Image (cartoon, grey):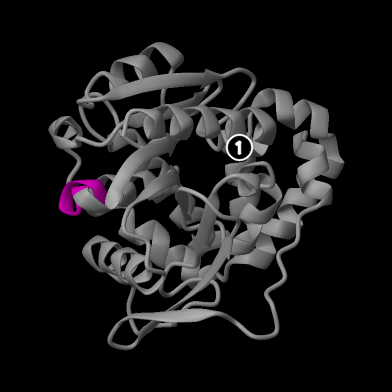
């Protein structure tokens, strides 16, 4: 399935009855669970919500249990007085797994949520079978570039609003190839989805949280779970060579490069992304 075909099938609607689970006092998470088999849990960055994943995981659902959910304070999960900390987001994920009786899972994270995946793998190694880190925000010496980008995006949001933020982000996050092929219809199609998924307040909260947390690359070496870094060769943060170097920081890591893909590579090429995830999970399961 191409990016254009996925966009045509994009359905951001929530069901009339929202399935939710309580993860800690005052917090209920909206979730979707589709398919059967080894569990894959999808971690949203702060720009997307759970329904978006339906169009980009159709192949994976055939053989795996695919779980997506809205982070607390985002989408259809509980709205709180303040944004949860990274530690609270991690506690919510473990609470979700407990409620769904998932003993261990593969975490599939994208952009800022790779930081959440890292923290959960470090704090709860027994609950994480493996990590798929798409467009990771980690650097070989720190995360300064990512935080600078997020501060610039937050400034655009506060001063000019959501539509201007989208116009700022789109050429940075989407690959040049996809930008050219999609043209104006692609730009406008994704803008409609972008504006539908989040409120300005939710995005501001998320972009502010991204400025927090430990930036040390040394943390990656402590992760014992098998890890695959999935990097577009047109990623704004890492070149392919640095992606391979980053993967070497993990105890059991490797890097897969997706050609003509940007910072969120599953948007550019859903079929290749799902095949990478499938191969990684099947290889890992074969060695369990």
Q: As displayed, is residue 20 above or below residue 205? A: below
In x, y percent, where is residue 111? 44, 42
Residue labelled with disc 1: 266
Point out the stretch of residues depicted in magenta.
120-125
Q: As displayed, is residue 248 above or below residue 113? A: above
In x, y percent, where is residue 154? 45, 56
Q: Residue at x 31, y 34 (%)?
A: 288
Judge by depth and name the residue closer to the eye, 194 or 98.
Answer: 98
Residue 5 as seen in the image, left or right of residue 52: right
Judge by depth and name the residue closer to the eye, 133 or 187.
Answer: 133
Q: Where on the picture, by quarter, is residue 12?
A: bottom right
Decide if residue 62 is in sight here: yes
Q: Does the magenta-highlighted stretch encompass residue 187?
A: no
Q: Residues within 10 Å of mark 1 (few under 14, many from 20)?
A: many
Q: As displayed, is residue 196 above or below residue 142? A: below
Q: Residue at x 26, y 61 (%)?
A: 86
Decide if residue 135 is in sight here: no
Disc 1 secondary structure class: helix
Judge by depth and name the residue closer to the eye, 160 or 200.
Answer: 200
Residue 211 as seen in the image, left or right of residue 200: left
Q: Residue at x 47, y 31 (%)?
A: 282
Residue 126 as seen in the image, left or right of residue 182: left
Q: Residue at x 37, y 74 (%)?
A: 99
In x, y percent, where is residue 243? 38, 20
- Quarter of the picture holding the N terminus: top right
Give the total number of marks visible in the rendering: 1
Kindly report the secondary structure that dominates the magenta region of the rendered protein: helix
Q: Where on the picture, by quarter, is residue 78?
A: bottom left
In x, y percent, where is residue 103? 31, 59
């Amino acid at each position: 399935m191409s990016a254009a075909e996925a966009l045509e099938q994009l359905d951001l609607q929530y069901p009339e009855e929202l399935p939710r689970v309580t993860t800690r006092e005052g917090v209920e998470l909206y979730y979707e669970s589709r398919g059967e088999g080894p569990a894959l849990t999808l971690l949203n960055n702060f720009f997307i919500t759970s329904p978006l994943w339906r169009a980009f995981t159709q192949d994976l659902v055939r053989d795996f249990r695919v779980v997506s959910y809205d982070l607390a304070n985002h989408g259809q999960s509980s709205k709180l007085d303040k944004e949860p900390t990274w530690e609270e987001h991690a506690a919510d994920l473990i609470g979700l797994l407990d409620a769904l009786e998932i003993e261990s899972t593969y975490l599939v994270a994208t952009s800022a949520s790779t930081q959440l995946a890292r923290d959960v793998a470090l704090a709860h190694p027994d609950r994480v079978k493996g990590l798929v880190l798409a467009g990771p925000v980690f650097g070989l010496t720190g995360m300064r570039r990512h935080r600078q980008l997020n501060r610039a995006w937050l400034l655009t949001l506060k001063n000019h609003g959501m539509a201007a933020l989208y116009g700022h982000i789109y050429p940075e996050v989407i690959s040049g190839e996809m930008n050219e092929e999609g043209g104006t219809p692609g730009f406008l199609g994704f803008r409609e989805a972008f504006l539908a998924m989040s409120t300005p307040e939710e995005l501001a909260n998320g972009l502010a949280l991204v400025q927090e947390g430990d930036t040390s690359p040394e943390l990656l070496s402590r992760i014992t779970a098998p890890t695959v870094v999935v990097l577009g060769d047109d990623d704004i943060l890492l070149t392919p060579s640095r992606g391979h170097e980053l993967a070497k920081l993990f105890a059991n890591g490797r890097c897969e490069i997706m050609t003509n893909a940007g910072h969120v590579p599953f948007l550019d090429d859903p079929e290749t992304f799902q095949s990478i995830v499938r191969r990684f999970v099947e290889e890992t399961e074969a060695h369990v």
